[in-house]
Amino acid sequence: METVAPVKKKKATSKRARTLIGWREWASFPDLGIDRINAKIDTGAKSSAVHAFRIKERDIGGEAFVEFFLHPVQRRKTPEIFCRAPIAGTKIIRSSNGQEEERFVIETRLRLGGRFWKVDLTLTDRDAMGFRLLIGRDALRRKFIIDPGASYLTGA
């Protein structure tokens, strides 16, 4: 009598479907008190960056924090939101024109398209830039499909 090995069934994967997003979307940082900020989705950038100014390092109870202010609305100086977060590290970032800048990195929750997850965020003065928030590849990886010809696909 011939013995036949049982066929192994593949486990059902619990991969969440990737959400379609455009080249710009509305996002928020609930842990920083930012309810709405216009984000540029930038697959050409590895890391994410948010507009921050008056950046100061603080020692609070023996832990390193960074305090900064943020203008979440493009081309506006108000509102001006005070933020504080533990420092996750520093990073040397090279801009598209080749200049290098050392930036503080914080870890915070990002909300985009109804999803929440933690991202590393560098702090820099983006006042002269078109968008106060740039979301790079590291934050987007395995979560979204990007339609470069569309905008605001996730709603407000």
Image (cartoon, rainbow, N blue to C red):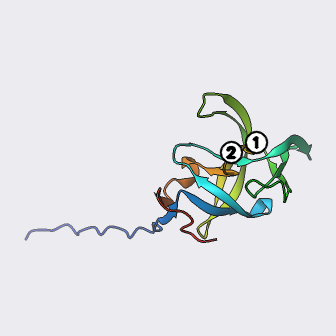
Q: Amino acid at mark 2?
A: Met
Q: Amino acid at mark 1?
A: Asp
Say above or below: 63 vs 17: above
Question: Which numbered disc, 1 or 2, marks the residue closer to the eye?
Answer: 2
Q: Which residue is mark 1?
A: 125
Q: Are marks 1 and 2 in contact (CB under 8 Å)?
A: no
Q: Quadrant of residue 7?
A: bottom left
Q: Quadrant of residue 152?
A: bottom right
Which residue ends up furthest to the front in the rendered image? Answer: 75
* Left or right of 10 in this view: 35: right
Q: Which residue is mark 2?
A: 129
Q: Is residue 62 visible?
A: no
Disc assigned to residue 59: none
Question: Relative to the observer, which residue lies in front, 66 or 43?
Answer: 43
**For the point 81% across and 51% down, which residue is it?**
85
**For the point 84% across and 42% down, which residue is it?**
55
Query: Helix, strand or loop at disc 1?
Result: loop
Question: Relative to the observer, which residue lies in front, 52 or 117?
Answer: 52
Query: Helix, strand or loop at disc 2?
Result: loop
Q: Position of residue 14 (x, y in %)?
A: 45, 69
Q: Is residue 102 visible?
A: yes
* Left or right of 140 in this view: 26: right
Q: Position of residue 137 (x, y in %)?
A: 54, 48
**For the point 61% across and 44% down, which residue is it?**
47
**For the point 49% across and 66% down, which residue is it?**
19
Q: Name the quarter where the N terminus is drawn.
A: bottom left
Q: Residues within 10 Å of mark 1 (few under 14, many from 20)?
A: some
Q: Position of residue 76 (x, y in %)?
A: 79, 55
Q: Position of residue 35 (x, y in %)?
A: 75, 66
* Left or right of 75 in this view: 136: left
Say above or below: 4 vs 133: below
Q: Residues within 10 Å of mark 2 (few under 14, many from 20)?
A: few
